[in-house]
Amino acid sequence: AQSVTQLGSHVSVSEGALVLLRCNYSSSVPPYLFWYVQYPNQGLQLLLKYTTGATLVKGINGFEAEFKKSETSFHLTKPSAHMSDAAEYFCAVSDNTNAGKSTFGDGTTLTVKP
Amino acid sequence: GAVVSQHPSRVICKSGTSVKIECRSLDFQATTMFWYRQFPKKSLMLMATSNEGSKATYEQGVEKDKFLINHASLTLSTLTVTSAHPEDSSFYICSARSDRVFHEQYFGPGTRLTVT
């Protein structure tokens, strides 16, 4: 069984400040990990993913995340927040044994203050 | 590449009627598509896995007779909400898994269903 916990349903940062969105996962097999962004009334857009290899992965819009197996974490960061980063962010986990299905976290709403 | 479309983007229907939502992979083949339901301020709830040429696999608690899924081709899956009721009002999102990249899903823009 797999699960995802996103700590903090709401995160508020000032424009230009560091963004840190937390994600912890549980998986009995090596996980594939994803971060998605969702803008109001839209579908999900992939920000970045970890499958194998380098544990620090870079994504679009300046976001990156680091896979830490010992901490079962995959936190999302961005050095400097932009107003356009305000959105809903979802962490998800899947693996190669469950027909590609993903389990999603409950989401984190990011607010960026001017 | 890897674009998924959904149609319609918004639909309003009367209670008791049925509504069909289409999900298309525009530039890749997808043997497998997924249908999700998203409530306001909530995460995505997987409803079913749609497999081309075979019956869909429904998640526990999802009524297969109410949410009919057909995956007739490698680029099209449809979700039909039968005898819709106001509690079926929701945001429905599909995703398509590329046959070449097993672990990655590409999401459609979603369909807002309102049942009056």
Image (tube, rainbow, N blue to C red):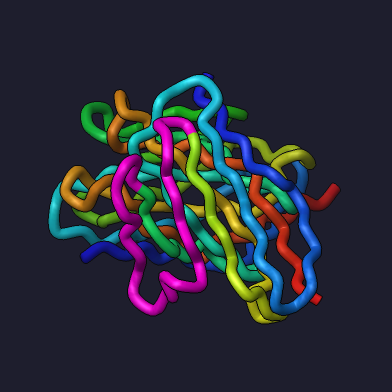
List x then y, in percent, for residue B48. Answer: 40, 60
Visible residue check, residue B42: yes
| Nearer to the camera, A35 or A24 | A35
Question: Could you tell me which residue is drawn at 55 percent across and 35 percent down?
Answer: B24
Q: In the rendered image of this protein, does residue B27 appear above or below residue A109? A: above
Where is residue A70 shown, x and y percent of the image?
19, 53
Q: On the rendered image, what quadrant is the C terminus of chain B found in?
A: bottom right
Residue A53, located in which quarter of the rendered image? top left
Q: Nearer the viewer, residue B60 or B43?
A: B60
Residue A68 visible somewhere in the drawing: no
Q: Is residue A56 above or below residue B27?
A: below
Q: Residue at x 45, y 34 (%)?
A: A48
Tell me if residue A34 comes above or below residue B25 in the rendering. Answer: below
Instruction: Give, as a single range, the part of the protein colored magenta.
Output: B51-75
Rendered residue at 57%/52% (across/down): B93
The quadrant where residue A111 appears: bottom right
Q: State the residue lying farthest toward the right.
A: A114
| Residue B114 painted magenta | no
Q: Is residue A88 left or right of residue B52?
A: right
